[in-house]
C-alpha cells in the first residue's frame, strides 16, 4: 500500500530499467477503509524520464472499492495501438475525497509483455495448440490445450 502526506499532487513513480510494452494497468482503491484518504482524481503519465512525461489517462471516482482498470485505448504502441511503451509511469493523485491531504493507494499492478522471450501474443495463443503423433505416425493437433491465466494475473485476495 502506498501512503503519502502533504500538499497535492502526490506522485507514485514507477521506473523500468528498459523500455517496456505495458498491456494493462490496474489500481486498487478502497473508499470504505480510507475515506478522505481516497483519491477522487488521478492522472497517469508516461515517458522516458521526468523531462518528457505525457498524460495518457485521467480517472475520476466517487467512492471506489476494488481494482480499477486504467484505459490504454489509443496510447499508440503495439499492433492495435493500445500498448503503452515507456521507461517511466507516473501516477499523479490530483485530488482526494473531502480535500484530504493524505493519500492511500492500496495496490498497483502493471502488466507488460516480456519481449526477451521473443514471443508475442499471437505466438502465445498458438503455444496452446500442441502436435502429437498418432498411432499412424501422422501428427494430430490437440486444440483442447489452452493457456491458463497465470496465477499472478488473477484477482488479488485482501486479508
Image (spheres, helix red, strand yellow):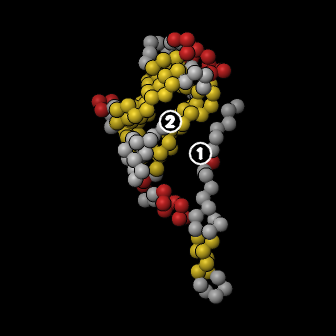
State the image quarter where residue 2 is shown. Answer: top right
Task: Tell me if 130 is positioned left or right of 9 in this view.
Answer: right
Mark 1 or 2, closer to the camera: 2
Q: Position of residue 15 (x, y in %)?
A: 41, 36
For the residues marked 1 and 2, what is the alpha-carbon distance in whole angstroms? 15 Å
Residue drawn at the location 61% of the way across and 78% of the way down: 140
Residue drawn at the location 64% of the way across and 38% of the way down: 156
User: Element at badge 1?
Assistant: helix
Task: Tell me if 69 is positioned left or right of 116 in this view.
Answer: right
Give the residue at the far right of this rendering: 159
Looking at the rendered structure, which numbered label has been put on residue 70?
2
Q: Position of residue 94 (x, y in %)?
A: 45, 20
Task: Tell me if 34 is positioned left or right of 40 in this view.
Answer: right
Q: Which residue is mark 1?
A: 153
Q: Position of residue 70 (x, y in %)?
A: 50, 35
* Residue 6 visible here: yes
Looking at the rendered structure, which numbered label has been put on residue 102?
none
Q: Quadrant of the C terminus?
A: top right
Amino acid at each position: 500500500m502506498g501512503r503519502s502526506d502533504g500538499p497535492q499532487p502526490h506522485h507514485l513513480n514507477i521506473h523500468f530499467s528498459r523500455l517496456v510494452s505495458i498491456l494493462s494497468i490496474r489500481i486498487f482503491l478502497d473508499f470504505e477503509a480510507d475515506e478522505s484518504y481516497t483519491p477522487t482524481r488521478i492522472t497517469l503519465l508516461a515517458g522516458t524520464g521526468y523531462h518528457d512525461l505525457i498524460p495518457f489517462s485521467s480517472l475520476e471516482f466517487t467512492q471506489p472499492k476494488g481494482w480499477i482498470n486504467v484505459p490504454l485505448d489509443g496510447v499508440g504502441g503495439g499492433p492495435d495501438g493500445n500498448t503503452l511503451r515507456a521507461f517511466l509511469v507516473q501516477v499523479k493523485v490530483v485530488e482526494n475525497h473531502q480535500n484530504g491531504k493524505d493519500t492511500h493507494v492500496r495496490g498497483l499492478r502493471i502488466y507488460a509483455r516480456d519481449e526477451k522471450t521473443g514471443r508475442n501474443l499471437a505466438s502465445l495463443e498458438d503455444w496452446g495448440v500442441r502436435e502429437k503423433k498418432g498411432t499412424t505416425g501422422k501428427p494430430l493437433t490437440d486444440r483442447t490445450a489452452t493457456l491458463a491465466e497465470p496465477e499472478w494475473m488473477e484477482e488479488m485476495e485482501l486479508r
